[in-house]
Image (cartoon, rainbow, N blue to C red):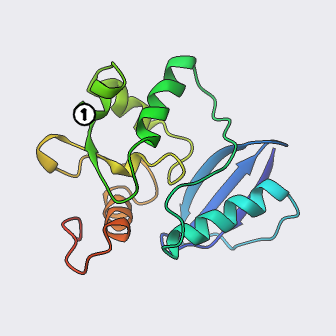
Amino acid sequence: MTCHIIASPIGAIALSASDDALVSVNMLGETAEPDTTDHRLLREAARQIQAYFAGELLRFDLPLAPASTRRGNELRAAVMAIPYGEVQSYGEVARRADSGPRAIGRVCSHNPLPLVVPCHRVIAAGGKIGYYSGGAGISTKRFLLTHENRQETSPWAA
């Protein structure tokens, strides 16, 4: 497994890949220093993440290989189907995936590929922001939702 660290508006992000697929995206915070890599896939993942934060990329196109079950992959695909700039409740995603809200919550809380698998777009019932396990938690989720909303008065801004 090869790793690469990049800088982002939410702090340092560590990317890990096998020879042919992205395995994890880990939001480290402000303390890690960016590095360089000659790994083709990690360079491409870094490029796409930087384009996402620049507002130039709406959907990631990377080969993914998170550790998971077949059902976990199906639930993850339901989360990935939420369009950029939109949110859906755990219940809405669960109905589309023929599952339950808690299963969607579990997939989101154990998501090894935040940003790429946009679990930040899954919110609680009634429009509440819900939980977020990536980066600095809720403040990171608010930042990502506000970034995608692109309004000066985003409903997600703190």
Q: Where in the figure is residue 28, as x and y percent of width and height? A: 56, 61
- Figure check: 44 above or below 105: below
Quadrant for the C terminus in the image? bottom left
13 horizontally vs 119: left or right: right
Using the image, determine if residue 56 lies above or below residue 19: below
Whole-percent x and y of residue 8? 56, 72
Residue at (68% x, 67% y) in the render:
47
Which residue is found at the position 23% from the left and 71% from the top?
157
Query: Which residue is identified by label 1?
Result: 92
Tell me which corner region of the image, top left, top right, bottom left or bottom right, holds residue 60.
Answer: bottom right
Q: Amino acid at mark 1?
A: Glu
**In this view, 52 is above or below 84:** below
Which residue is at the far right?
38
In the image, residue 50 lies at what x, y percent?
60, 71
Give x and y (percent) for residue 96. Answer: 32, 27
- Residue at (50% x, 45% y) in the render: 117
